[in-house]
Image (tube, helix red, strand yellow):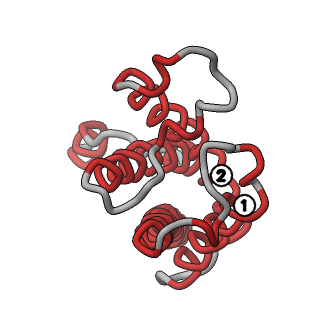
Amino acid sequence: MASDHQAANYPKAMSFPVMVFWTGLFAGLLWSTIGFLAYYLSFTEIRPNSILIPWILGDWKYGWIGTIISIIVIGILSIGVAFIYSALFKRFNGLWVGLGYGAILFFLVFLILNPLFPANKPLLSLSRNTIITTVCLYILYGIFIGYSISYEYQNKKVQDKEAAT
């Protein structure tokens, strides 16, 4: 009886899809904020606001409110990115798959989707600092999402296995 009472005091763990949701949202908010800091410190020419420029009218999108809304939009889009990772790669352990995922996202955004963002120059027209900084940010973003999701997936498998025995 005492063990039932103790178990009732522990909070229920998040379901795996809820964890993927929060991982994606937090990853987008965190890494786009770091991307803005990199822009502010002149490590890159690209700022988060470039996501709003082709879609929103008005000069406000270039100011601080545009930056905050851009970071939130990137966070929301990152939820989808996290669910795609979960669907395709959650079974893989380690950093390498997340690193590759981040690199793929970089090339997807800067080579394939670049025409959607006219504020961004073509990849080979960007400065070396911008390319290096942005590639690093995308790789760290991919590792963050990949490692978090894979770790939780493996942890859940172990817990389910222990619960079955």
Instruction: Using the rendered image of the protein, determine whether residue 16 is visible from the camera's viewpoint.
Output: yes
Q: Are marks 2 and 1 in contact (CB under 8 Å)?
A: yes
Q: Nearer the viewer, residue 29 or 87?
A: 29
| Residue 129 coordinates in the image, percent (x, y) | 40, 71
| Residue 74 coordinates in the image, percent (x, y) | 53, 40
Q: Nearer the viewer, residue 43 or 2?
A: 43
Task: Identify residue type, mark 2.
Answer: Phe
- For the residue labelled by badge 2, is the local secondary structure a helix, a strand or a loop? helix
Left or right relative to 62: residue 80: right
- The residue at 38%/25% (across/down) is 63
**Cα distance in 3D space between marks 2 and 1:** 6 Å
- For the residue labelled by badge 1, is the local secondary structure a helix, a strand or a loop? helix
Res 116 → quadrant: top right
Task: Identify residue type, mark 1.
Answer: Ala
The quarter of the rendered structure image containing the N terminus is: top left
Question: For mark 2, does the 10 Å Cα neighbourhood hold few (<14), some (14 to 19), or many (20 or more) residues?
Answer: some
- The residue at 59%/31% (across/down) is 52
Left or right relative to 52: residue 10: left
| Residue 5 coordinates in the image, percent (x, y) | 25, 39
Q: Nearer the viewer, residue 8 or 83?
A: 83
- The residue at 62%/72% (across/down) is 101
| Residue 140 coordinates in the image, percent (x, y) | 42, 69
The residue that mark 1 highlights is 87
The residue that mark 2 highlights is 83
- The residue at 43%/65% (across/down) is 137
